[in-house]
Image: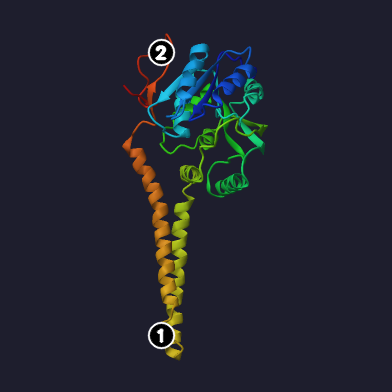
Amino acid sequence: MADRELGLLSVVAPVHNEQGSLVEFHRRVTGALEGLEFELVLVNDGSTDHSAEVLERLAADDPRVRVLHLTRNFGHQPALTAGLDHAAGDAVVMLDADLQDPPEVILEMLEKWRSGVDVVYAVRTDRDGESFFKIKTASLFYKLFDRLASVPLRHNSGDFRLLDRAALDALLSMRETSRFLRGMTIWIGYTQASVAYHRQARFAGETKFTPQRMLRFSIDALSSFSNRPLQLATLFGFVISSIAFLAIPVVIILKITGNYLYGFSTVEITMLLLGGIQLLTIGVIGEYIGRIFDEVKGRPLYLVQQRPRRSGDPVSDGEEHGEDAQ
C-alpha cells in the first residue's frame, strides 16, 4: 500500500524520573509535528521525582497529551508496552523522553510510512554523550546477538521506531513477560526500512540503564530470540565427556608403563573444571526455566494507577494488556 493518509499519529514515551527534560521534550515534539493530528502518550513508570506533577501540568495545558500513571516502576519495556496498548493512532512512534532520540526524525519516518513501509526503525550514526564502555558493550551485544539470535537485528538500532497500526496490533498480540521490543518488531515481519540519525546527549538527568540493567536486558534479549545457549550447554557436555572418555586409555597406558604419577594434580583441576561447567550449564538452563516460570504465572505486564479517558473509551481495558488498579 502506498500514499497512505494519516488520520492520527500516536507518539509514545515512557517516563522514569525525567522531570528536567519533560517540558523541553513536549516543546520539541509539538514543534516537530506542527500541523499534524497527533497524540502524545506519556507513561509515568513509577517516577520518584516530580515527573508526575510535570506530566499532569502538560496534560492540563495540552489536550493532545495523555498521561498514564503506573502503580510502580515496572521497567522500560513494560512501560513502553503500556503506552503502545493505549495508543489510538494509525501510525505509532515510540521513543524515550530524554531527547537522545530527536523528535524531528519522526517526519522522515512518516514519509517512509506514507510510501507503504509498515515498520520504520531509526539507526544511530553517532552517539553523543555516551561513555566508551557503553558504546563498546553495545557493539559487543549486537555482535553476540547476530551469532546467537534468530532475527536480523540492525546494529545501532534502538526502540526509536514507527509502526503501522496493523504491525502494532501484531506486536501487541505477543504478551511474553521478558520483552525485547526492538527484536519483536523485527520478528513480526511486514515491510521494514530504516532512517539514519545522529543520537544526541541527554538533555537532563542521568541514564537509568546501569551496567546491571544492561546485562539483564541483554540476557532477556538473547533468551527471547535464541535457544543457542542451551545447545552450547549440550555441546560443552559432549566435548568434556569425550575428553574424559579418551583419557581413560591414556591413564591405563601410563599405569602399565609405570609412568603414572600418584597425586596427579590434574585430577583436582579436572574436577574443578567439570564442576564449573556443570554449574554454568545449570545456570543457563535455569535462566530459561525462570522465564517459563514467569510466563505460566500469567501476571499482567503492568498495572495502571490512573489514566485519562476519552468520551468513547470503555470503563476498563482488556485484562490481557494490563490491569487498572483501584
- Amino acid carrying label 1: it is Tyr
Q: Residue sitting at 62 percent across and 21 percent down?
A: 28
Give the quadrant of the C terminus: top left
Q: Is residue 134 above or below residue 110?
A: below
- Return the residue at label 1: 262
Please say whether residue 63 is visible from this viewpoint.
no
Q: Position of residue 99 (x, y in %)?
A: 60, 29
* Location of residue 258 in the rendering, given as x and y in whole percent from the top left corner: 44, 91
Instruction: Give the SS element for disc 1.
Output: loop
Q: Are marks 1 and 2 in contact (CB under 8 Å)?
A: no
Which residue is located at x 46 percent, y 37 percent?
Answer: 179
Which of 86 and 253 lies nearest the eye of the viewer?
Answer: 86
Label 1 packing within 10 angstroms: few (<14), some (14-19), many (20+): few
Question: Is residue 23 visible in this depiction of the protein?
Answer: yes
Question: For this rendering, which residue is in front, 161 or 211?
Answer: 211
In the image, farthest residue toward the top: 311
Q: CA distance from mark 1 to mark 2?
A: 80 Å
Q: What quarter of the picture does the N terminus occupy?
A: top right
- Which label is found at residue 313? 2
**Residue that lies at the very extreme toward the bottom in this rendered image:** 258
Front-lying residue, 316 or 6? 316
From the viewer's perspective, is 101 left or right of 212?
right
Q: Residue 98 appears at what percent x and percent y? A: 57, 30
* Mark 2 surroundings within 10 Å by alpha-carbon count, few (fewer than 14), some (14 through 19), many (20 or more): few
For the residue marked with disc 2, what is the amino acid?
A: Asp
- Where does the image place residue 102, in percent across and percent down from the top left? 63, 27
